[in-house]
Image (cartoon, grey):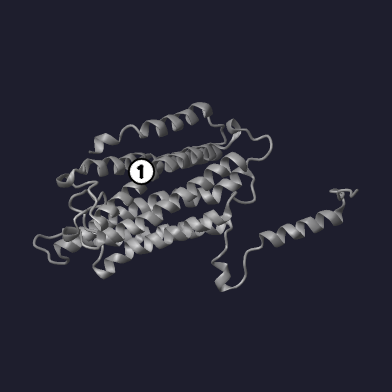
């Protein structure tokens, strides 16, 4: 019968700490550095990449405003203007707003909970690289005159007909699929992190407020993005296989795409809005040196807002 080592023995503790540091040591070398899955590094990559896409989208908006600055301006063609408009909206919504929440949450959540890292580090890495690949697909299409030009909402039948939309809609759908999978992966990571990485004694009602908002928004992402993913699949099947999901002439319904898109699109507003409110709710009491009043009611308000946001998509249609 073997006995367990004495945890109070300094030599035993030193050996355990050495093994722990070896396991969590970041990869060395220029190539292997990019395989790191530490939450801080992944969060920084997310932040820098999202800011890069935001700046690029801002340049597209500047070109559009320059085109509209004077009458009869011929800076860009009508088709290029539509591409700029579509890419700007798509990038700000899919490549900046939601990824910035994920970036901040991936960095802050382990610190808020006292955890060493998130529960699935490789899932965080997978999510980032999926986000980057999808973003490059979507944003890079403008340089090959293959950007989508049907608006960031991509309403059929304008976008489902290949003779009207060209290759741009296919590139948009392909890139968007990577981005959506990335968002769902990050949501799963954050939900499990909140529920399973809390220290002993930290019940849900004792969590920092921002951790609650991370949980609420991640659940919203988990329910809001799958309808859009399903819509993307149906969209591509109609374009590539000529199946009649959205074509009224063949028995389809163009409103089906609008339902699938805005079931995602309206909760998206609160997916972006709620984390910023939570950050202020976390910072202001700290600097004011006062406890936050009404903690349970603030949490219930966030949960109620998330629930109601899924029932209001119709007013977009």
Q: Position of residue 2 (x, y in %)?
A: 89, 50
Residue at the outermost right position:
1
Residue 25 horizontal/vertical position (percent): 66, 62
Q: Is residue 308 visible?
A: yes
Does residue 58 appear in the picture of this structure?
no
Q: Residue at x 48, y 46 (%)?
A: 187
Which residue is rendered at x = 46% and y = 57% of the image?
A: 47
Residue 88 percent across, percent down from the top left? 28, 56
Is 170 on the left-hand or right-hand side of 26?
left
Return the residue found at the far bottom. Answer: 30
Q: Which is nearer the eye, 17 or 58?
A: 17
Q: How many numbered circles does the render carry? A: 1
Q: Which of the 4 image quarters holds residue 227?
A: top left
The residue carrying pointer 1 sits among few (fewer than 14), some (14 to 19) or many (20 or more) residues within 10 Å by Cα, namely some
Query: Which residue does the numbered mark 1 point to in the structure image?
Result: 227
In the rendered view, tell whether residue 268 sits above or below residue 25: above
Q: Residue at x 55, y 48 (%)?
A: 108
Which residue is at the far left? 72
Q: Which quadrant, please, contains the C terminus?
A: top left
User: Which residue does the image show at 26% across and 56% down from the upper left?
Assistant: 241
Residue 218 location (% of width, % of height) = 47, 42
């Amino acid at each position: 019968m073997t006995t367990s080592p004495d945890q109070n023995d300094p030599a035993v503790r030193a050996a355990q700490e050495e093994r722990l540091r070896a396991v969590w040591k970041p990869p060395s070398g220029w190539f292997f550095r990019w395989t790191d899955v530490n939450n801080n590094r992944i969060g920084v990559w997310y932040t820098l990449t999202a800011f890069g896409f935001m700046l690029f989208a801002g340049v597209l908006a500047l070109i559009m405003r320059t085109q509209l600055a004077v009458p009869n301006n011929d800076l860009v063609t009508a088709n290029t203007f539509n591409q700029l408009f579509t890419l700007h909206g798509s990038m700000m919504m899919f490549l900046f707003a939601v990824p910035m929440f994920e970036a901040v949450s991936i960095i802050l959540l382990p610190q808020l909970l006292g955890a060493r890292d998130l529960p699935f580090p490789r899932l965080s890495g997978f999510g980032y690289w999926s986000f980057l690949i999808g973003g490059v697909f979507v944003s890079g299409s403008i340089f090959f005159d293959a950007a989508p030009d049907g608006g960031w909402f991509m309403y059929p039948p304008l976008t489902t007909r290949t003779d009207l939309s060209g290759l741009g809609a296919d590139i948009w759908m392909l890139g968007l699929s990577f981005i959506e999978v990335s968002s769902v992966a990050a949501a799963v990571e954050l939900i499990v992190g909140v529920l399973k990485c809390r220290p002993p004694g930290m019940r849900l009602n004792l969590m920092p407020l921002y951790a609650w908002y991370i949980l609420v928004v991640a659940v919203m992402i988990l329910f809001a993005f799958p309808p859009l993913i399903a819509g993307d699949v149906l969209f591509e099947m109609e374009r590539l296989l000529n199946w009649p999901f959205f074509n009224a002439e063949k028995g389809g319904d163009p409103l089906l795409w609008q339902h699938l898109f805005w079931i995602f699109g309206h909760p998206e507003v609160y997916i972006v809005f709620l984390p910023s409110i939570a950050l202020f709710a976390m910072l202001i009491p700290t600097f004011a040196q006062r406890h936050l009043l009404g903690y349970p009611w603030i949490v219930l308000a966030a949960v109620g807002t998330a629930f109601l946001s899924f029932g209001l998509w119709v007013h977009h249609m």
